[in-house]
Image: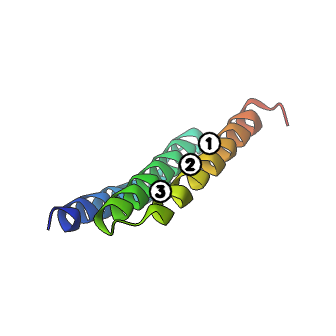
Amino acid sequence: MIFIAIGTVLAALIALAVVRFALGPTLPDRVVAFDTMNTLVVASMISFGVGYESVIYIDVAIVYALLSYVATLYMANYLEGDI
């Protein structure tokens, strides 16, 4: 039961981040919203992994978090004009 509540809260937070991504007046605002969405997706995967007692969700969350970190670094370099 608790994992349903956690999933609902995380889904609501992801929806708010999508709104910020769509309405963000500047590109850095959108990058932060994108990073927030990725972090919440990782939290959702971990929550599902614990709720369903499946390790594969945790493994996928680790890989997804690594790829999200690299994408954030790439976007930050692009915004600085280094690329």
Look at label 3 and name its amino acid. Ile
Task: Residue 34 in the image: state x and y as whole percent.
Answer: 53, 51
**Residue at position x 69%, y 43% from top?**
70
Report, in whole angstroms, how far the alpha carbon at label 2 lies from the one at label 1. Answer: 6 Å
- Secondary structure under the numbered disc 3 in the rendered image: helix
- Location of residue 14 (image quadrant): bottom left
Residue corresponding to mark 1: 69
Left or right: where does residue 19 sit relative to residue 29? left
- Secondary structure under the numbered disc 2 in the rendered image: helix
Quarter of the figure that contains the N terminus: bottom left
Graded by Cα atoms within 10 Å as few (under 14), some (14 to 19) or many (20 or more), the crowding at tag 3 reads: many
Left or right: where does residue 77 sit relative to residue 3? right
Residue corresponding to mark 2: 65
Look at label 2 and name its amino acid. Ala
Residue corresponding to mark 3: 58
Quarter of the figure that contains the C terminus: top right
**Residue at position x 76%, y 39% from top?**
78
**Residue that protrudes farthest toward the right in the picture:** 83
Task: Residue 31 in the image: state x and y as whole percent.
Answer: 57, 45
